[in-house]
Amino acid sequence: MSMDGSPVSSSVKQKLGHLLPGGLGRAMAVLGLLLLLFYVFSFNYPYSQDSASNIYLHFPHKWWASLSGGATTATPTNLSHIVFRVFSSLKMWEARKVYLESWWRPNITRGYLFVDGLTKNESLCPYTCPPILINEDITNWEIYPLIKNPVQVHMVRSIMEVFRQGDQDVRWFVMADDDSVLFLDNIVEVLSKYDHTKYFYLGASSESILSNAYISFGMGFGGGGLALSYPLVAAMSKKLDGYIKRYPNLWSDHLIYMCILDLGVAISQQKGFHQIDLRENIAGFLSSHPQSPLLSLHHFDVVDPIFPSMNRTESNRHLMKAAGVDQSRLLQQTICYQREKNWSISISWGHSAHIYENLLPRHILQMPIETFKPWIWNAKWPKFMFNTRPVKSDPCEAPHWFFFESIESKNKDDVNTTYSRAEKRGLSPCSLGGNHSADHINRIQVFSPAKTRLKVGRVECCDVLSLSDENTTNVRIRPCMEAEAIA
């Protein structure tokens, strides 16, 4: 029947019957495809990395290459997609260049070095450092007399000046200081989890509460490292000078934060970036690292050397020996128990190991021992952005300390790290644990998988093996079994 109730003519029925089985179906399919193409190319709608990649496979037009400085999302993020900005000064350069040289990979890493006070482009370390850029002159600015600290302005503008170099295939810009040590493999792995075509501001707060309270709990501290996506830096570069002129007295990290905040972007906290707003002995902090890849360590020349009997330069190089073999496990805490002796063993891979003469739960062992002081000396409790436990003289709570000594691969399956005793504990055995003293243990050997990187967000388990001799404890790190409790 027609809409008015009259019979449909037989000729119309005949035509419809001819179209419906084949002709009309094809016509509708063609029309649908045309509408889809019109929608794809006519609207600038938000898209995910996966959907964009699928479209790219079928329509490899030039407009795609304009995203992220020419980088495409068809390939996973790797080190070549990241440009690093390192800031130093002539006054501190000689003392601190060893930190940069320890992580920079010549002819592989991309980036630029700014040295405040340098007025001409000269080679300070031609083979082991990034190429040098000279900050643009701002002395002719009308507000220049109002700028309290020109170095801070140079630090802020340096990220814009790096962007203006026009490097191709860039997805991320990473900012760090000359006394920051970065861990490139882990940075690549973390950044690859994010969609670099969107606005992202990655960093971490200070470890000290007062440092955050004085500025902002929502700000990333630049010495610990900041990672900014290409589109975010592109947007910032258009507005940065305006913010500097509006707030000439703010410090660099704060200025960057203010600009990014006005673009509607909040920080994505990354626990592996470490400002290290701590003082003196940070061994307790490093022995209980958060469950996150180690990305950076700042203030290396402020804290005590992180290994006994070594200076800061030697300590840095020693840590990088472990990093050169397996960054994914560096400082990652693994806990297991020797139940026959009622011992708890905690491994901070590549740095230190503890033996406790008592069975202590994981929620205790994952809290750093407060061997360190806050950045601001007169800070009152609570001082830190994380829970801590005090240094104890109780033999059931005080650990035997062992520090990373050597690393080797004796076969294709295992990496063997050795940790040697720092000093005698000087306490009686723990009576609650059955008086099983660990005073005779001088060395801990740890075997970890050579072929498998530790995945982001995963924790591993371990087993205490039979003793190779009466003075050595052997531990094997392994994947945790399903629903295995570390207790």
Image (cartoon, rainbow, N blue to C red):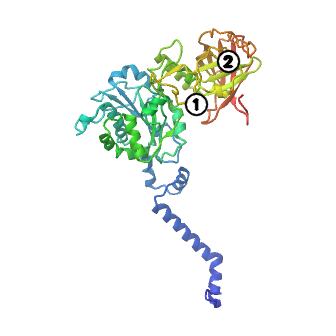
The amino acid type of the residue labelled 1 equals: Pro
User: Which residue in the protein does label 1 denote?
Assistant: 290
User: Which residue in the protein does label 2 denote?
Assistant: 356
Residue 144, disc:
none
Compare residues 122 and 348 and report the one nearer the observer: 348
Compare residues 328 and 403 and report the one nearer the observer: 403
Residue 289 higher or lower than 444, as above or below: below
Work out whether residue 137 can be spotted.
Answer: no
Q: Is mark 1 on a helix, strand or loop?
A: loop
Q: Tag count in the figure?
A: 2
Mark 1 neighbour density, 10 Å: few (under 14) some (14–19) many (20 or more): some
Q: Residue at x 70, y 14 (%)?
A: 430
* Apparent side of residue 135 relative to residue 459 in the rendered image (left or right): left
Which of the 4 quarters of the picture holds residue 447? top right
In the picture, the quarter occupied by the C terminus is top right
Mark 2 neighbour density, 10 Å: few (under 14) some (14–19) many (20 or more): many
* Apparent side of residue 198 relative to residue 160 in the rendered image (left or right): right
Q: What element carries label 2?
A: strand
The amino acid type of the residue labelled 2 equals: Tyr
Q: Where is residue 78 in the image (x, y as percent from the top left)?
A: 51, 39
Compare residues 407 and 376 and report the one nearer the observer: 376
